Amino acid sequence: KAGVTQTPRYLIKTRGQQVTLSCSPISGHRSVSWYQQTPGQGLQFLFEYFSETQRNKGNFPGRFSGRQFSNSRSEMNVSTLELGDSALYLCASSHTGSREQYFGPGTRLTVT
Amino acid sequence: GQQLNQSPQSMFIQEGEDVSMNCTSSSIFNTWLWYKQDPGEGPVLLIALYKAGELTSNGRLTAQFGITRKDSFLNISASIPSDVGIYFCAGQTTDSWGKLQFGAGTQVVVTP
């Protein structure tokens, strides 16, 4: 079974721009969680989607948003990029009712 | 910032030695997960724990869910060079589906 895939793997953007990252969960998994990983703050939870509904949200500004499609694929969007948004963005999927989360390789976002 | 206290921050060990690391939290968790992350990759799930007192093994890895539900331990026996990486603990509370709280990580370096 294929693992979690994320596209693109690397991205360079300029301050003020917006960006959309994509995540395809493991086949059959309907829950997708997003995390931001930085050297200073570590891994921090952004939000979680299940059946196209956001069930949980972390403490990030409204510039960070996401959505999930009927095939469970998910996207996250960051608007008005700031230098501090440079990070590895990870998504993880889990099977319904399971607490085990399986991570993708991440998207490395650099904001200049 | 980090919500779990993970220690030690780093370990330099010789091949063949055992490794121990632990995480403590001020919150009660109903799930503890242990992950390993290699550079440029997403975290890989090693062990999942669901019950207080539970002891689970995966090859040379053994992890325990603390009795108080506020801590967990991971042991690696007879370390080998491929054990190099960063190990993270992650916990989830009962009312927080999809949201994992992560420790800061333990960097393990194995010397021949």
Image (spheres, coloured by chain):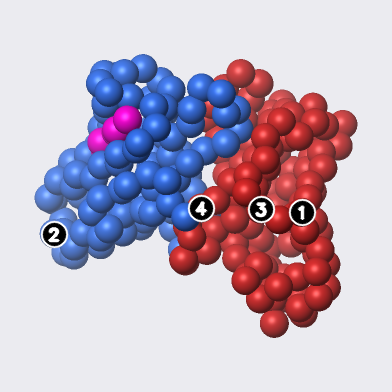
- The segment highlighted magenta reads B70-74
User: In the rendered structure, which amino acid carries the disc numbered 1?
Assistant: Gly
Counting residues from the start of the chain, the first of labels 3 and 4 encountered is: 4
Marks 4/2: CA distance? 28 Å
Task: Give the number of the mark in front: 4 or 2.
Answer: 4
Q: Residue reaching furthest bottom?
A: A112
- Using the rendered view, name the quadrant where residue B52 is placed: top left
The residue to which callout 1 is attached is A62
User: In the rendered structure, which amino acid carries the disc numbered 2?
Assistant: Gln
Marks 3/1: CA distance? 7 Å
Q: Residues within 10 Å of mark 4 (few under 14, many from 20)?
A: many
- Which residue is depicted at the point 87% across and 31% down? A70
Marks 1/4: CA distance? 19 Å
**Magenta region, mostly helix, strand or loop?**
strand
Q: Chain of mark 2?
A: B
* Residue A19, percent from left and from top: 80, 64
* Residue B50, percent from left and from top: 41, 20
Q: Chain of mark 1?
A: A
Residue A43 is marked as 4
User: In the rendered structure, which amino acid carries the disc numbered 3?
Assistant: Phe
Same chain, labels 3 and 1: yes
The residue to which callout 3 is attached is A60
The residue to which callout 2 is attached is B14
The colour assigned to chain B within the rendered structure? blue
Which chain comes out red in the rendered image?
A
Same chain, labels 2 and 3: no
